[in-house]
Amino acid sequence: MTASTITDRQPDPLDTEYVLGLVDTALDAIAAAKTSAQLKQVRIDHAGEKSPLALANRAIGTLQPGQRKHAGQLVGQARGRVNQALAARQAEVDAAELEATLLAERVDVTLPVDLHPVGALHPVTALLNDMSDVFISMGWEVVEGPELESEWLNFDALNMPEVHPARGLTDTLFVDPPSDRKLLRTQTSPVQMRTLLSRDVPIYMVSPGKVFRADEYDATHLPMFHQIEGLAVDKGIHLGHLKGTLDHLAKAMFGDVRTRLRPHYFPFTEPSAEMDLECFVCHGESVGNPDRPCRTCKSEGWIEWGGCGVVNPRVLKAAGIDTNVYSGFAFGMGVDRTVMFRNNAPDLRDFVEGDVRFPRSLRGGAR
Amino acid sequence: MRVPMSWLRELITLPANVTTAQVADALTRAGLQVERIEVTGADVSGPVVVGRVLEFTEQPQRNGKVIRWCQVDVGELAPRGIICGARNFESGDYVVVALPGAVLPGGFEITARKTYGRVSDGMICAEDELGLGVDHDGIMVLPAQVNGQPLTLGADAMDVLQARDEVLEIDVTPDIGYCLSMRGVARETAQAFGVAFTDPYLIGNVRPTEGGYPIRLESENCTVFVALTINDVDPNAPTPTWMAARLVAAGMRSISLEVDITNYVMLESGQPLHAYDGDRLRGPIVVRQATQGERLTTLDDVERKLSPDDLLITDDSGPIGLAGVMGGQTTELTPTTRNIVLEAARFDPVSIGRTFRRHKLPSEASARFSRGVDPALPLAAARMAARLMAELGGGTVADAYTVVGQAPAMPVQRIRADLPARILGAPISAEQVVEVLRASGVRVTGPGEGTGSEWLRLVPPTWRPDLVDEYDYVEEVGRKVGFGVVRPSVPSAPPGTGYTFAQRSRRSVLNALATAGFVELLTLPFISTDELDRLGLAADDPRRATVRLANPLADTQPFMRTTLLPGLFAAVARNTSRSQDDLAVFECGAVFLANNRGAAPMPDVSRRPSPAEIAAVTGNLPDQPRMVGGVLAGSWVPSGWQGPAEKADWRHAVYLAQIATATLGMDLGRRATQREPWHPGRCAELFVGSGDDEVVLGHAGELHPKVIKAYGLPERACAVEFDLDALIAAAPRGGEVHPISPFPLTKQDVALVVDDDMPAAAVRQALVEGGGELLESVRLFDIYTGAQIADGKKSLAFALGFRAADRTLTEAEAAKSRQAAVDRAAQVCGAVQRA
């Protein structure tokens, strides 16, 4: 008996052979369906309202009451088997189709993704942020002030007498006319004096920012550069506190390195020192070792990092602070120069000429 | 200061095993930074020996030159034949001979070579060929005896000339001027190594004395003046080799015996001396300030216009010297000078500093005077020089001399013996303090010697004008014991509150801009008028109110920037010239806006200034707001596999400002405006807030084509500039969270026809006002102009979203709210709902 012949017959819900034949025919068709569309047609043909099984089911109502139970069981089980097979096949076909779709939708995930340009902070900004963070973490405050400043705050209040060579027109950029006593600050220390004048001690502060000198413009000199200067004024402050603070900064910035103080002279501090940073690349191993030269410290083992010292009491007195009770320390270092030796930047002019490759080369950070 | 080690080792007895490097290290640790150690004579190697010219024949050449064919005895069995082009020697003269195998400065190798038809078996050397000087007028002729010893033929000439030495180059800080002398460096070195030091100069408080050359002081800028006369000096007496060698090693030149002696004594003692030709002086020497318009021709043959601030040495003929800086021509020594008047004086450091800077005449003398010369030194130094002139030049030192003025008393200071330990944070005992200060020449009384047990009474030596304040002595102790004894510890600051709101805000904005794709630049803040002209600024534009510098680095850019844009434009042009065409750059920095707040005062520094003085000194300055500027050019995203380029346009300039406002929790408001240097139809005024709280921040848009051309920028370049300080000041602090409604959103679209020039933002604002509380979102999704609506009109399509906080809206409620929004738009903007 073939499928076509059996489906062409009059539905007979009492004919076991007929009903099972319908089931076999349906199961064959279900197994043969390869796509959702085919399966949908199979469902219509073999389980739909006009399918032989549905017609057989409907015919049960025309039977004698005594026959109905048997027929109902027969047809009900048959329809159940067909529906079960349909659901199972549907799941298989769906999975296969999803798999095919996903395969077809694959992309080359290595293609460049350029939704916007590559931005970057300037390395000086990034480093100033890093250095300021160290002091904020110690409970210090960051204070800023104007770049165009009063001569008194930049020099006199900091114990730099009028005859100091740095106060000349050859070193400092003055506002016209010079009798206005205004200039482009040569250091960020005037911010410290502003703070001393506006606030009670104790003070623990750093002042980052731009400073200016009437300097030449070449690979190692800029007329505008950046400093971060620190000031601590409290009871019992001494040079050991300065050394400890600088060692901490060095460690936070460069890892396991120390600083070294060499006596020097600055009007603002007394005693004064130059501060050297132990080379964080070679740790001094390049000294006297021509086989392992170090370009960061030029094989000297130490890098000149800045100036520092105990605040000259004359400076505190100019702010009206009792120097019998309070003392302080101060330090300052060049930020651009720090970027230079930290990141092997060869030419300071790159810092201000605006070639976008310079900030991008460090992506604004890179310790 | 250049310090020859041979000289230093003569002044103090260092242990033999102490190396030059160790000396350099010790001095550096004591604050005398040794910049480098130079080895003189190191570039001469191989046989360079003393020889004697036995005889020579002169041989004229075809080129007109006459050469000498010399037989030179260099201590060998037979003399050598050497060709020499110089003719400044006689038979029997001692000369320096470089033999084959020698290498002279510049890598010049000497070989036996054929020249002028003969084989020249070496070279007779001139001063410059040995690197000993610049003289090439002839060969060096040596005296028969050097330092009292007869010359040995064949001896190493560099040793005989004492041309091999190690020289310390010391960077002397301004406070320790006494270390601009061998005497000072020797004292410091002796202290560093704990060896004895005997000052070769018998300094002391000298009483005014008359009887020598008459002197009159008429200016307070000269406190001591000593005049000492030496007669009958032999003008032809040569400078001894040892002295010349030391002068050269110390960086000076050998000129003549008398001048060399004054320089030698200056280098050794630190006291600049001046020698006058006694026969050319006219009447008493008078030290006075110059008068306006006076003139003096200095030794360098330059006629100088003098100012009343200049201190002068004069005689009856007028000015004869710029005191402490440079002598004059009329009384300078000549090759026939026999009678010399020596000047040794003490001039005011500030006065000398001003004069040498005004006349741009830095000299060895002015360097020392401007840092302060030991006021007790002049007579001792003059006597040393006179003695040398007598010994080496055969002169007679006149018995009578003149001393005018007196060294001032040194200031007494008292410190507690534990002050150095307290300020240095180091374990330094009172005994150590006393020991160190005494070795530095300080007179120390105490502790316990009649001044109270803890106190030290201190009087500095005359050569230490830097020792005044208590902390000066702390530094002196610190320098001498070394900062290595300092015990590091981190002080504990009071609990902090972190960055200020403004600092955090600024950092957030800059980080956000960098993350969004903008590259931060820093540019120099100097501009020219021309740059402002090229921006197209009107004559009365506030950005023309510039601050001018008195001494700009470049005369072409004497002004401080009032806008960041010119600097950014220059950076953009530089980038495009380097084929970086797609640019999104920004800068955050101050601009300088001139005002007329008057001069800043200069209060007395010995006390705290008054509140009014503080207000003026901190406030009489130009306004310096911190701006953000940005420039865009080329493509925001270049064309690629994903599609065509997204050109940078006015939207990206606005976007930059939007990032800044959004980062600080604000919406950026915009309205059309016209402002240089922007395109008049494509410039937005940027603001935050509304009504009375509105704050205008700046501008954004496409640049004016004329500006683009004037600055050489890429076509359609765009720019933005706004006041970051003002933005941060307007930023909200804190704020409230909106309740989140869980009810469904009801969406309704509306298309409104308005006049073509009606700003979309105005229509949107009207919808917001009209829609009331239920209107949650408004989004412009289409703009239409064309056939279906009238000319001069446009259709704006908005998607409106309605939602209530407490219920699901009915269609009727949403429709009512929508109608209210449309009505408001009709009322305010003349909007007509499109059918």
Image (cartoon, coloured by chain):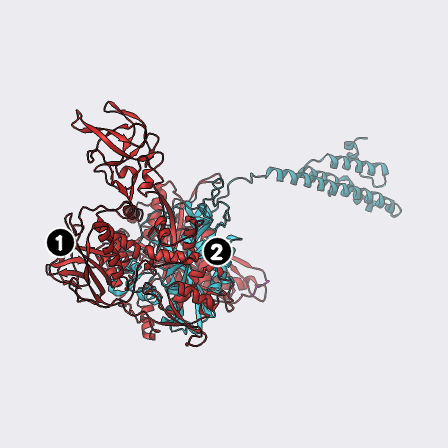
Chain colours: A cyan, B red
What's the amino acid at mark 1? Thr
Along the line of sight, the residue nearer the viewer: B351 or A143: B351
Q: Is residue B669 magenta?
A: no
Question: Which residue reaches farthest right?
Answer: A66
Q: Are marks 1 and 2 on the same chain?
A: no
Tell me where residue B775 appears, x and y as whole percent. 50, 62
Q: Secondary structure at mark 2?
A: strand
Magenta range: B739-743
Tell me where residue B619 appears, x and y as whole percent. 33, 68
Tell me where residue B21 appears, x and y as whole percent. 42, 49
What's the amino acid at mark 2? Thr
- The residue identified by callout 1 is B330
- Describe residue B690's horizontal placement relative to residue B243 as left or right: right
Along the line of sight, the residue nearer the viewer: A176 or B525: A176
Most prominent secondary structure in the magenta stretch? loop
Q: Which mark identifies residue A259?
A: 2
Question: Label 2 marks which chain's residue?
Answer: A
